Image (tube, rainbow, N blue to C red):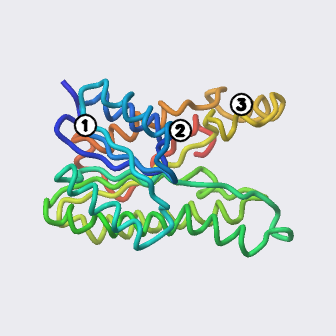
Amino acid sequence: MGLLKGKTAIVTGAARGIGKSIAIRFAQEGCNVAFTDLSYNEVAQATEKELAAYGVTAKGYASDASNFEGTQVVVDQIVADFGQVDILVNNAGITKDTLLMRMTEDQWDAVINVNLKSVFNFTKAVQKTMLKQRSGSIINMSSVVGVSGNAGQANYAASKAGMIGFTKSIAKELGSRGIRSNAIAPGFIITEMTGALSEDVKKDWESKIPLKRGGTPDDVANICVFLGSELSAYVTGQTIHACGGMNM
């Protein structure tokens, strides 16, 4: 009894953090998982074993999500290996935070390429398969700062806001073919990335959140299960905020 039984998902940037939690939750729901990260190493192999333990097919792939040709090659390989793609989770992302006056062109380009261009790359690459199937769910990992902005994160916020505009456009383009496109805007989620922050900073964040806690990767992964499954069959073009009420 799995909400995603018989489906195949691609999850980008899934060796750790939110991406890995999504891959695990998908496997628990009976979904076969192809996941990507910058390199295929022992971490990826361990994740493969962890996912396969749920009785599903799981395979890791090395992929620079910001590379257009490389993404097409990886997706073609995944389609050859799995035979179908029902869910795409565009989760690969980086930060290079600094005030605009100090931000270099490289810091801008790197964040836009990894966070935003990767969404174009992967969505374009899976589109053909989903159109043939006349079904599919595309889930783009945006951010609360893509909605409300954040000082010191102009590059990151721009990339995440761009993702929301892309999500809505794709929902309009592909809806008639049974393909859905939605975004998730996580707030303050406790991961390795936020784990580096001091206790004081974390407490300050939590005090501003109506639910009075940071989110967990599972809080985000559960929304992905909903969006990837038939439970959300009539939901497309939406941005779901997973932020404990931080943004309303």
**Mark 2 and 3 residues: CB-CB less than 8 Å, in contact?**
no
Q: Position of residue 41 (x, y in %)?
A: 49, 43
Residue at image position (56%, 60%) is: 160
Q: Position of residue 187 (x, y in %)?
A: 60, 42
- Camera-side mark, 1 or 3: 1
Q: Earlier in the sequence, mark 1 or mark 3?
A: 1
Dot label at residue 206 = 3
Single out the residue that lies furthest toward the front: 42
Q: Position of residue 142 (x, y in %)?
A: 52, 54
Amino acid beneath label 3:
Glu
Residue at image position (17%, 65%) is: 177
Give the image quarter of residue 248. top right
**Mark 1 and 3 residues: CB-CB less than 8 Å, in contact?**
no
Check the image and report above or below for 66 versus 17: below
Amino acid beneath label 1:
Thr
Q: Earlier in the sequence, mark 2 or mark 3?
A: 2
Give the image quarter of residue 6. top left
Residue at image position (24%, 64%) is: 175
Question: Is residue 121 found left or right of 144 in the rendered image?
Answer: left
Q: Earlier in the sequence, mark 1 or mark 2?
A: 2
Q: Residues within 10 Å of mark 1 (few under 14, many from 20)?
A: some
Residue annotated with mark 2:
16
Mark-to-mark CA distance, 1 and 3: 38 Å
Question: Is residue 68 found left or right of 231 in the rendered image?
Answer: right
Residue annotated with mark 1:
57
Identify which residue, 168 or 218, lies in the foreground: 218
Identify which residue, 219 or 31, lies in the foreground: 31
Mark-to-mark CA distance, 2 and 3: 23 Å
Identify which residue, 242 or 82, lies in the foreground: 82
Q: Residues within 10 Å of mark 2 (few under 14, many from 20)?
A: some
